[in-house]
Amino acid sequence: MNLLIILLTVIINILRGSLWQKKKQEKKILKAVENLFSKNGFNSVPTKSIAKDAGITEMTLFIILSLKNYCINDCKRKLFIY
């Protein structure tokens, strides 16, 4: 029983850490987007530049954005019953 509690505690702490890391990355992305769009305009900024300016990989950028879009679309479906 004690081992199970320890394992659950470790898993919860890992999840909390990854959520904190994701929020930190989202803030970096938003800052990079604001900076790059204000300098170069919307159409002139590739995702590679956003990722580089945010200090993350382009794959991480795609993962974060796709997860966020999935959540937004899921909420829309529930609210508006698509």
Image: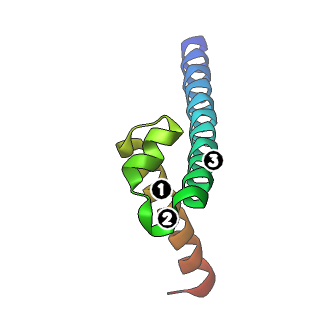
How would you rate the neighbour count of disc 1 (Cα within 10 Å): few for under 14, some for 14-19, many for 20 or more?
some
- In the image, taking residue 28 as reference, residue 58 lies left or right, namely left
- Whole-number angstrom distance, CA of label 2 to CA of label 3: 19 Å
**SS under mark 1:** helix
Q: Viewer-proximal residue, 54 or 17?
A: 54
- Above or below, comparing residue 24 to residue 48 in the picture: above
Q: Viewer-proximal residue, 23 or 54?
A: 54
Amino acid beneath label 2: Asn
First in residue order: circle 2 vs circle 3: 3
- Whole-number angstrom distance, CA of label 1 to CA of label 2: 6 Å
Residue shown at the point (58%, 33%) measured from the top left: 21
The image's colour scheme reads rainbow
Point out residue 36 in the picture as x, y percentages from the top left corner: 54, 53
First in residue order: circle 3 vs circle 1: 3
- Above or below, comparing residue 21 to residue 35 in the picture: above
Residue extending furthest toward the front: 39
Amino acid beneath label 3: Lys
Q: Which residue is mark 1?
A: 65
Q: Which mark is residue 31?
A: 3
**Looking at the rendering, which quadrant does residue 39 occupy?**
bottom right
Q: Which residue is mark 2?
A: 69
Residue shown at the point (56%, 68%) measured from the top left: 72
- Look at the numbered discs 1 and 2 and tell me whether their residues touch, using CB distance below 8 Å: yes
